[in-house]
């Protein structure tokens, strides 16, 4: 019996790299790094706010914490109606930011879902139940207007 010669797989990645157009496409770096230009920070903010709006998060507030802390530039605080809603809102924020090329540094609190924290490097997102939000009062802690910042300096 003669041995048949294997035909090459025309869809192999190696074959794609041999063509000029595919080589140029393969040389492009993937967007998924942690450092983003200033315009990308705005897009991260819009991605987060869109995800919160999609899931109907309540009382969304964006706080500018530059100059107050080195851990983030902005904090986003939002509320959910129940622990299930808080968990779903947080999951949607994580999904949408990953789709946009931003990788969360960490997600905490998904088990209990009273308060879920998502660390996105430049932004930190807090999704909480209203009673937890009222108890901890993060807005009072981090929201310093320009006049209060000037008086503090």
Image (cartoon, grey):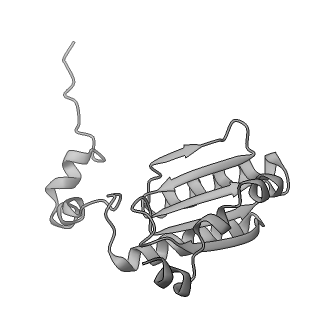
The residue under the point 57% across, 82% down is 145
Place residue 76 in its image quadrant: bottom right
- Quadrant (top left/top right/bottom left/bottom right) for the C terminus: bottom left
Q: Residue 128: image x %, image y %?
A: 73, 54
28 vs 50, left or right, is: left
Q: In this view, does 79 lie above or below 10?
A: below
| Front residue of 142 and 121 | 142
Place residue 102 in its image quadrant: bottom left
- Quadrant (top left/top right/bottom left/bottom right) for the N terminus: top left
16 vs 69, left or right, is: left
The residue under the point 71% across, 61% down is 137
Q: Residue 66: image x %, image y %?
A: 44, 72
Q: Residue 35: image x %, image y %?
A: 31, 63
| Front residue of 13 and 2 | 13
| Front residue of 102 and 120 | 120
Total residue callouts: 0
Q: Is residue 38 above or below residue 112?
A: below
62 vs 43, left or right, is: right
| Front residue of 59 and 30 | 59
The residue under the point 57% across, 76% down is 144
Q: Residue 150: image x %, image y %?
A: 47, 84
């Amino acid at each position: 019996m003669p041995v048949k010669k294997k035909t090459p797989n025309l869809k192999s990645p190696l074959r794609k790299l041999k063509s000029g157009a595919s080589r140029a496409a393969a040389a492009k770096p993937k967007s998924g790094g942690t450092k983003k230009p200033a315009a990308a920070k705005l897009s991260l903010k819009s991605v987060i706010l869109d995800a919160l709006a999609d899931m109907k998060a309540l009382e969304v507030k964006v706080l500018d914490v530059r100059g107050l802390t080195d851990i983030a530039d902005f904090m986003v605080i939002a509320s959910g109606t129940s622990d299930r809603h808080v968990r779903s809102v947080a999951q949607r924020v994580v999904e949408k930011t990953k789709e946009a090329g931003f990788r969360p540094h960490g997600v905490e609190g998904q088990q209990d879902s009273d308060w879920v924290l998502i660390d996105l490097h430049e932004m930190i997102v807090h999704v909480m139940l209203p009673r937890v939000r009222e108890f901890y009062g993060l807005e009072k802690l981090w929201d310093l207007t320009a006049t209060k910042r000037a008086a503090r300096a």
